[in-house]
Image (cartoon, rainbow, N blue to C red):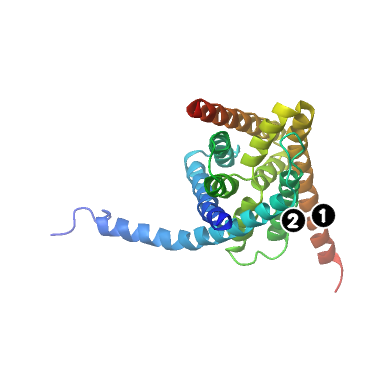
């Protein structure tokens, strides 16, 4: 007797699909994890080197976030306009290293703490960080893209 | 020890951010970067809690500096906002920046307040 439903998905099929998906995802998660540790340790290093009082402008976190955004702009333009590179490069550097290096939660808590003690400084930090971050990401992406396209046009 | 705990927190926080982002992307097909928004707001709440409690250095390193630091991100937030601007979705770009900051501050304050209330 023929199989009444040849396209039926068995439990074994489902398990095999799930295993295959994990085999694809695990290296990506691993790369992000290792990158995240490296980025976070670097951020910690900067915060130890540049400690700040709650009433002061949190220069360490500000700097880390702005530089991280600049590098993110560079990286994304490189991946888009230059050679794509290894498939794990973007998860490792972009999501892992730069994601771990920059932090939104510390920006938020720094803002709250500074605002409670020095409202003016708190406001400057609150508005200054996203503005500088956006400008940095734009500069990083634009400079990289322009450089790549100019080099491509020049005869070698 | 601080460095080791920080590394453990970051090793979990960074890939978890990616998983949350993927999960949100598969459920909400939207130009608005809800995934990054969700991790940043959640992470701000957790850090508020940790910052408001008299937590030992190890806990601060593991959950605060390591996990929350790696779980939340400024670089992707900045990049996604720029992409919205460049794609002509100016309103979404401004909304993303304003809503992320406002919701993050709200979540962080709730975390801090809750921690102080719990601690008494």
**Residue nearest the observer in this picture, A79 or A108:** A108
Apparent side of residue A56 relative to residue B102 in the rendered image (left or right): right
Residue A49 point in image, percent of width and height: 73, 53
Apparent side of residue B33 relative to residue A22 in the rendered image (left or right): right
Question: Circle 2 — which element?
Answer: helix
Residue B30 point in image, percent of width and height: 56, 38
Residue A108, quarter of the rendered image = top right
- Characterize the local packing of mark 1: few (<14), some (14-19) or many (20 or more) Cα atoms within 10 angstroms: few
Task: Kindly identify the residue that appears in the image at 61 percent across and 40 percent down.
Answer: A105
* Mark identifier at residue A91: none
**Residue nearest the observer in this picture, B99 or A40:** A40
Residue A68 point in image, percent of width and height: 71, 51
Question: Circle 1 — which element?
Answer: helix
Instruction: Confirm or deny contact between disc 2 and disc 1 (CB under 8 A).
Output: yes
Which label's residue is closer to the chain start, 2 or 1? 2
- Characterize the local packing of mark 2: few (<14), some (14-19) or many (20 or more) Cα atoms within 10 angstroms: many
Q: Which residue is mark 2?
A: A74
The quarter of the rendered structure image containing the C terminus of chain A is bottom right
Kindly identify which chain the residue marked by label 1 belongs to.
Answer: A
Q: Residue furthest left?
A: A1
Residue B83, quarter of the rendered image = top right
Above or below — where is A8 with respect to A107? Answer: below
User: Marks 2 and 1, Cα distance to the nearest angstrom?
Assistant: 8 Å
Task: Kindly identify the residue that appears in the image at 52 percent across and 46 percent down.
Answer: B59
**Residue nearest the observer in this picture, A62 or B61:** B61
Above or below — where is B21 with respect to A122? Answer: below
Kindly identify which chain the residue marked by label 2 belongs to.
Answer: A
Q: Which residue is mark 1?
A: A143
Apparent side of residue A129 relative to residue B39 in the rendered image (left or right): right
């Amino acid at each position: 007797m023929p199989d009444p439903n040849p396209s039926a998905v068995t439990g074994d099929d489902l398990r095999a699909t799930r295993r295959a998906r994990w085999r694809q995802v695990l290296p990506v998660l691993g790369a992000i994890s290792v990158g995240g540790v490296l980025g976070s340790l670097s951020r910690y290093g900067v915060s130890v080197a540049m400690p700040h009082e709650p009433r002061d402008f949190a220069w360490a976190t500000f700097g880390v976030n702005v530089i991280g955004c600049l590098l993110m702009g560079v990286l994304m333009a490189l991946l888009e306009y230059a050679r794509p590179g290894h498939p794990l490069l973007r998860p490792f550097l972009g999501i892992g290293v730069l994601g771990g290096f920059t932090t939104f939660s510390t920006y938020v808590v720094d803002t709250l703490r500074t605002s409670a003690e020095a409202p003016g400084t708190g406001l400057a930090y609150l508005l200054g960080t996203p503005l500088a971050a956006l400008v940095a990401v734009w500069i990083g992406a634009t400079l990289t893209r322009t450089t790549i396209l100019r080099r491509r046009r020049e005869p070698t | 020890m601080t460095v080791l705990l920080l590394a453990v927190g970051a090793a979990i926080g960074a890939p978890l951010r990616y998983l949350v982002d993927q999960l949100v992307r598969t459920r909400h097909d939207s130009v608005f970067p809800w995934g990054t928004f969700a991790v940043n707001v959640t992470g701000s709440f957790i850090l508020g809690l940790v910052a408001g409690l008299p937590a030992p250095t190890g806990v601060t390193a593991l959950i605060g500096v390591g996990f929350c630091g790696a779980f939340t991100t400024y670089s992707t937030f900045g990049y996604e906002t720029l992409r919205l601007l460049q794609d002509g979705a100016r309103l979404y770009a401004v909304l993303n920046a304003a809503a992320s900051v406002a919701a993050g501050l709200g979540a962080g304050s709730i975390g801090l307040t809750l921690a102080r209330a719990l601690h008494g």
